[in-house]
């Protein structure tokens, strides 16, 4: 049964018609009605129109559209999700690839100041590129996410290989960064039993080595990691449009009073990620220490790329956007009003101008009263 308060028709654009973007275009065109109750209207944007047309002919799908990159601004108003797959340089050289991709992101950022949909970044290094886009554009930082599910997927595959004889039901998560994530072993369940009660620390270390080695093995065997990346992005797209599945994405978080993008398990609502905070708060002390070290390495990496700037992303704005999103789920009118009063106290920063206020909507699901927000300069009154 469909939820009358939910969106079921999505316009999704893929930026980049290379190997990753083209194969993703083919895969999303194959999505069947039994996989989702939502409808996808797909567009592919290439540097020129030639490559997108080739991919369209390969797909045999004439309903989806293909365009050159220069035409992108003409379609931003109608787009719900933009998936950035464009890339330059050697994708197997993370530092060089990221440095060149930062140039592509800076060029894109100028075009997205007025974009209110969700941007999904799939190119290397996703956490750094998300940070750069949030820093350079006027977008809501929470509406920028990176593909980070590969880390979790490889962890789950490694667990399946270790427990192959049991055909295990696996619940497993990672947190951290692309190419530098932490296995949340304290929250991993195998057939509903805690992983740490089933195997030794040595076995866990072997699983960690196995999942980290998967990317290198894939490149050696088939020359690319594109197949698993495409599958991961498809699962992320389904999580975004269905608003039920949990996926790991790179999303904005506060680290030492600074904004940083890192991979965390989320669900989506209204094209915005909702972090599984319960899971994150319950991380073991060892996992917290490992994540702290990974954060330091990520910041050092971004320094080398010329991307990191202390305080470049306004944390007050992130708090504002998070509280706005939390209000969407409130079932108590009294609690809604209390949260709006909290927002009033947060909104003394000049960043909250008329444009941001116009985007502040409180949409209640079926059975709840729609509360109207009245604008008065930089104050919300109910």
Image (tube, rainbow, N blue to C red):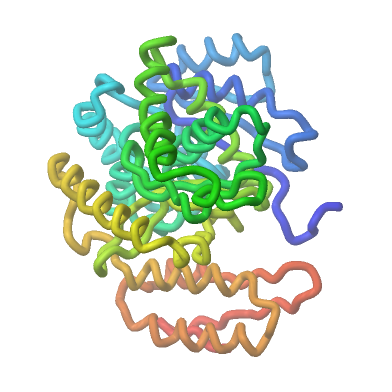
Q: Nearer the viewer, residue 129 or 198?
A: 198
Depicted 346 relative to depicted 122: above or below? below
Count of number-bearing discs: 0
Q: Nearer the viewer, residue 182 or 233?
A: 182
Compared across the picture, whether 99 is left or right of 168 comes to: left
Residue at 33% across, 26% down: 87
Q: Quadrant of residue 259?
A: bottom left
Q: Quadrant of the C terminus?
A: bottom right
Compared across the picture, whether 146 is left or right of 329 comes to: left
Residue at 33% across, 65% down: 254
- Residue 123: % across, % down: 37, 32
Residue at 54% across, 68% down: 325
**Visible in this render: residue 277?**
yes
Depicted 274 relative to depicted 370: above or below? above
Depicted 25 relative to depicted 273: above or below? above
Depicted 298 relative to depicted 234: above or below? below
- Residue 49: % across, % down: 46, 17
Residue at 39% across, 37% down: 208
**Visible in this render: residue 147?**
no
- Residue 311: % across, % down: 21, 64
Q: Nearer the viewer, residue 228 or 319?
A: 228
Q: Quadrant of residue 64?
A: top right
Q: Nearer the viewer, residue 146 or 38?
A: 146
Compared across the picture, whether 52 is left or right of 330 comes to: left
């Amino acid at each position: 049964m469909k939820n009358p308060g939910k969106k079921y028709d999505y316009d999704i654009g893929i930026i980049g018609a290379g190997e990753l973007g083209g194969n993703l275009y083919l895969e999303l065109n194959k999505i069947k009605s039994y996989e989702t109750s939502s409808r996808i209207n797909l567009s592919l944007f290439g540097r020129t129109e030639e490559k997108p047309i080739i991919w369209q002919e390969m797909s045999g799908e004439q309903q989806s559209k293909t365009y050159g990159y220069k035409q992108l601004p003409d379609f931003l108003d109608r787009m719900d999700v933009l998936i950035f797959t464009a890339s330059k340089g050697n994708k197997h050289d993370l530092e060089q690839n990221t440095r060149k991709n930062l140039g592509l992101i800076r060029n894109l950022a100028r075009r997205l100041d007025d974009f209110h949909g969700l941007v999904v970044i799939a190119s290397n290094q996703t956490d750094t590129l998300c940070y750069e886009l949030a820093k350079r554009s006027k977008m809501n930082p929470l509406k920028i996410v990176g593909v980070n599910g590969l880390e979790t997927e490889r962890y789950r595959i490694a667990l399946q290989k270790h427990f192959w004889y049991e055909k295990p039901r696996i619940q497993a998560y990672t947190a951290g960064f692309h190419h530098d994530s932490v296995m949340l072993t304290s929250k991993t369940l195998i057939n509903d039993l805690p992983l740490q009660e089933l195997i030794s620390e040595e076995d866990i270390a072997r699983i960690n080595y196995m999942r980290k080695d998967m990317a290198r093995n894939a490149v050696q065997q088939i020359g690319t990691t594109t197949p698993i990346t495409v599958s991961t992005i498809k699962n992320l797209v389904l999580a975004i449009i269905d608003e039920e599945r949990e996926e790991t994405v790179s999303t904005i978080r506060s680290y030492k009073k600074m904004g940083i993008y890192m991979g965390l398990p989320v669900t989506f609502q209204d094209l915005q990620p909702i972090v599984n905070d319960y899971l994150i708060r319950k991380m073991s002390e060892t996992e917290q220490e490992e994540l702290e070290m990974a954060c330091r390495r990520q910041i050092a990496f971004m320094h080398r790329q010329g991307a990191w700037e202390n305080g470049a992303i306004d944390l007050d704005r992130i708090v504002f956007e998070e509280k706005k999103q939390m209000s969407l789920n409130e079932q108590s009118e009294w609690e809604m009003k209390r949260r709006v009063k909290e927002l009033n106290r947060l909104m003394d920063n000049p960043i909250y101008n008329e444009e941001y206020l116009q985007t502040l909507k409180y949409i209640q699901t079926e059975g709840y009263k729609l509360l109207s927000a009245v604008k008065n300069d930089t104050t919300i009154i109910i």
